Image (cartoon, rainbow, N blue to C red):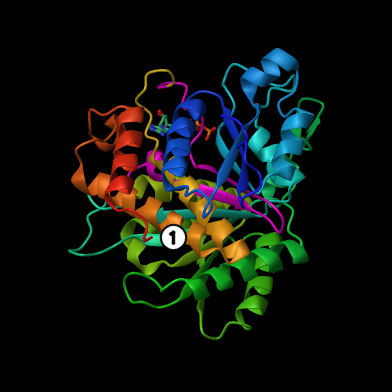
Amino acid sequence: MRRAADLSVPHYRIAVVPGDGIGPEVIAEAVKALQAVARPGRLQLAFEQVEAGAACYRRTGEELPRETLEVCQAADAILFGAAGLPDVRFPDGTEIAPQLTLRIALDLYVGLRPIRLHPGVPTPLRLDDGERIDYVILRENTEGLYASRGAGVLVGGHVATDTLVVTRPGVLRICRQAFELARRRRGAPRDGVRRVTLVDKANVLKSYAFFRSLFDEVASDYPDVQAEHAYVDAMSMYLVQRPGHYDVVVAENMFGDILSDLAAATVGGLGMAPSGDIGEHYGLFQPSHGTAPDIAGKGIANPLATILSAGLMLEWLGRRDGNAEAARAAARIEAAVGDVTRAGRVLTPDLGGPGTTDAVGDAVVEALAATPAPA
Ligand code: ATP
């Protein structure tokens, strides 16, 4: 991949960070899908590939080289594969995770995790006829318990502490994003009600009670959106029992992390779960899964989560710039993935098929070609 030669026509610069494990395999398919929706002079995408992750750390001693950070900062958006390998660690034993470093460096405070059951995709849930799963988890990405990453305290080999950080501006901004998102959506599948559900443990910890009081403050500015609370333990049950009730779910960092894997399992697994990490100035888009070392190099990783993440990226660019062409391309990618899963002919083993990563990517490109954008 290289930057497009013709910089005179409008184009988006996309920093591409393939990373480790299955990262490069799934990224290649997402780039194929993006190239298939690009239109000369209308939606032009220029890719710039850069390095980060465990292999990079092993070779250079840096998980996120300065050049990579600079390319990411200069880009319109970042497309990220996955990074980190179990046997490559920092001296303190923690894993290489440039994606987490980027979250803090670029202040990507919104962890956007759409949970949608695509047609034909098997779910372990028993759903009523016609029942749909279509909600979004907004995970606060920069505070919470994970704010202590790299800063916890180990006292004399006997006591370890990590601090849960909740700040007023941090909570207000993620809650506002949640209500704004609910306004843009069409409500929960089950009843069409625009709803934001806060997940916490306000009955146990002061920090979560504070989070809840701030959520309520924001909710009062959005009388058209229903606001409700759920404790995280009960929520893990509700997401299995009544997923159709949910529209937008907002949660502290760690709770959002855990619930989004549970939620992904209900819509076909991590291979079907896209994500965006978004701030005021930057957006990074990546599958919710990690580097999956157990299947890396076998050509069987499901690329759909990454392809859907590429769609999220275009949707975000489209909204940021009022660019209808990007918004249309995003919708086409989402629809093409639905066409591929509905047909069920080419699917990877995680979805019960015999397909390979690149065959699924090709199937998405074919589906895009079968439904061209309007002239
Ligand atoms: P991390 O901690 O970085 O999130 P992890 O090791 O906890 O990573 P993953 O790498 O996401 O988890 O893998 C979890 C399981 O899901 C593995 O068995 C892996 O093979 C499977 N998996 C993850 N992504 C995919 C994918 N795209 N296609 C098929 N299987 C996948």
User: Residue 147 placed where, x, y %?
Assistant: 73, 46
User: Residue at 52% of width from left, 52% of height from top?
Assistant: 43
For the C terminus, the quadrant is bottom left
Residue at image location 25% in from the left, 53% down from the top: 119
Task: Please state the extent of the stretch shown in magenta in the rendering.
Answer: 268-295
Left or right of 157 in this view: 246:
left
If the picture is divided into quarters, which one holds ligand 1? top left
Q: Quadrant of residue 178?
A: bottom right
Label 1 SS:
helix
Q: Residue furthest top?
A: 59
Where is residue 359 shown, x and y percent of the image?
30, 30
Q: Is residue 68 above or below residue 93?
A: below
Residue 66 place in picture, x, y as percent: 79, 30
Residue 64 image point, x, y percent: 72, 29
Q: Residue at x 58, y 60 (%)?
A: 201
Considering only vertical position in the picture, is 183 above or below 253?
A: below
Q: Please, which residue is most extreme toward the right here?
A: 156
Between 62 and 215, the residue placed more toward the observer is: 62
Three-letter amino acid code at the position of disc 1? Arg
Q: Quadrant of the N terminus?
A: top right
Left or right of 2, for residue 214: right
Determine crowd level at label 1: few under 14, some 14-19, many 20+ residues with C-alpha closer than 10 A. Answer: some
Residue 123 seen in the figure: no
Q: Is residue 85 magenta?
A: no
Please name the residue that numbered disc 1 is placed on.
Answer: 328
Residue 54 visible in the current orientation: yes
Does residue 80 appear to the left or right of 56 in the view shown?
left
Q: Is residue 287 magenta?
A: yes
Q: What is the quadrant of residue 300 in the picture?
A: top left
Residue 101 to residue 91: above or below: below
